[in-house]
Image (cartoon, grey):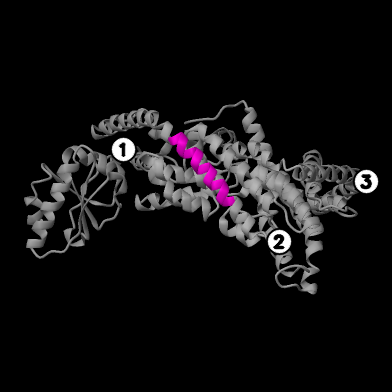
Amino acid sequence: METGKQKTSLKAKIQKLGTALSGMVMPNIAAIIAWGLITAIFMEKGWFPNKQIAELIDPMLDYLLPLLIGYVGGRMVDEERGAIVGAIATMGVVVGSDVPMFLGAMIMGPLGGYCIKKLDELFQAKIRSGFEMIYNNFSSGIMGMLLAILGVYIVNPIVSSGSHLMSQGVDWIISIHMLPLANIFIEPAKVLFLNNAIGNGILVPLGVQQVASAGKSVLFLLESNPGPGLGVLLAFMFFGKGNAKASAPGAVVIQFIGGIHEIYFPYILMKPALFLAVIAGGVTGTFTFQLFGAGLRAAASPGSIIAIMMMTAQGSYLGVLAGIASAAIVSFIIAAIILKADRKSEGDDEFAAKQREMKQMKAESKGQATETTDLTDYANVKKIIFACDAGMGSSAMGASLLRDKVKKAGLNEISVTNTAVSRLKDEPNLLVVTQEELAERAAQKTPHAVHIQVGNFLNSPKYDEIIAKLKTSTYLEPETNSPETKAKPELELDQVEEIDFIRHDQNRGTSTMAVSLLKDKLHEQGKNIPVKAVRLADLKDDHHHLVIVTKEAQKNLEVRYTNVQVLVVSDLLDLDVLLEKL
């Protein structure tokens, strides 16, 4: 079983801090969007001004949003009791403040959760039976009251001063047109999975303050601009090679329309020189936003072109589109130059990868275990969790892909879900799939789970490895279930709706010829049964599929699939046995 490092690295600590900040904002994005829509549509200078509805704007900004953040911050530390005390404590910094208290809520929420948690550790076990309710209610109430008073007299003045200072600093950077340089740090940090920490933990609170005073903010666009990532993916579409080129079109749709930016991170990590492309794209985009005076009413989350258009302030549509387009063009040009210049080394890498693949296929065809096979770890797996930073975008996509493969493989007892890496729990019988950059944190949260690292949730060959190992492990216990000892069921050819030949690199010509011959024979007999040559990994584990294999390939097939009907022949081109039965 793979386990993570016991010592936390600096990168993991930074990711953990960023996740804590974004984790307080992310669950409340819907509330921020609701506030942004009400502001954009019904404010005095909105699309459809309505004075009565517009009265919601200030209370939502000043009270609802900070209290929600404080509530979630307390819950992250100590569940419901922490959430309640965190919300009470947040009220202390909200009242009397002349700035939206997002930062204050991020302090008081977790502080409330931490204080009530420590108080319970000291006294809860000493409470006599029958006094639990009075202790729980009064301890939370008194702790919340004390923290709220602390917020009024201490935290509120400090945070207010700090917020004014930060706002002035941002305004100054914008006034001297230096804001585009922020992308020199933002774009690399995004690729290191700090995108949610930067976007929701830092820029959104500052942006909301700016909207309250100016009606729109460019800060919402700094991290959510899909242009830099779009340019890189388009470059891979035209100038990439192998799997990267093949998967790029799908990634473009998911990134630009779906707003899941994590999808392009592996492409950059594969060629670190592409950091230059996204940095240049980001700087260009932000410069263009400023040039047009563009901004959004509220956070666009996820960073989809649809969400951005919905949050765009009146009069900013041209500037926003120009900024996204210019970022994509610059990023595309630089990425294309890098990819074309790096073509030789990429070819070498692909050759090496192909060699490894061939070596593994050769071992599997002989029934040998591969170097990474450790089937005992998979024998008890009952739950698979995909974990990403926010637990809402890329992990959901990966879970959907593997869930489909698990279903096709007939492994119906195994559930496949997704969550944020910070919410992982060390449960028994668990397999965790996460991206390489988050693997260390996932291993710390779930030291007893089986861990799989992938580079790209959208298209990972490890999904097929997982399915193969899970299927193989079902034969380990009990021993009587092994392929050799399991009773072979009689073929039910009247149930067959499709006939398949297994296609791989060693027999591509043979399987293609066999498909053609069998189609002709069936046509002569007036039978209309589809005949296909499919890769082993793409086979559907369904009783209505009849798979024709040689004895050499039989074991590899039966290890992976249990529901298909199997006909073993000595020669794929000798179809007399099958035709007689059909």
**What amino acid type should be assigned to the residue bearing mark 2?**
Gly
Task: Please name whichever residue, 351 or 319, is drawn nearer the observer in this view of the structure.
Answer: 319
Callout 3 crowding tier (Cα within 10 Å): few <14, some 14–19, many ≥20: few
**What amino acid type should be assigned to the residue bearing mark 3?**
Tyr
For the residues labelled 2 and 1, say whether their Cβ atoms are less than 8 Å apart. Answer: no
Visible in this render: residue 420? yes
Give the residue at mark 3: 153
| Foreground disc of the pair 1, 3 | 3
Q: Is residue 57 left or right of residue 532?
A: right
- In the rendering, at what x and y percent does residue 386 appear? 51, 45
Q: Is residue 370 left or right of residue 267?
A: left
Give the residue at mark 2: 36
Quick one: SS at disc 1?
A: helix
Quadrant, the C terminus: bottom left
Task: Please name whichever residue, 248 or 502, is drawn nearer the observer in this view of the structure.
Answer: 248
**What amino acid type should be assigned to the residue bearing mark 1?**
Glu
Question: Looking at the rendered structure, which numbered label has been put on residue 479?
Answer: 1
Distance of label 2 from label 1 (alpha carbons)? 61 Å
Magenta range: 324-339
Which quarter of the picture shows residue 389? top right
Q: Earlier in the sequence, mark 2 or mark 1?
A: 2
- The residue drawn where x is 88% and y is 53% is 98
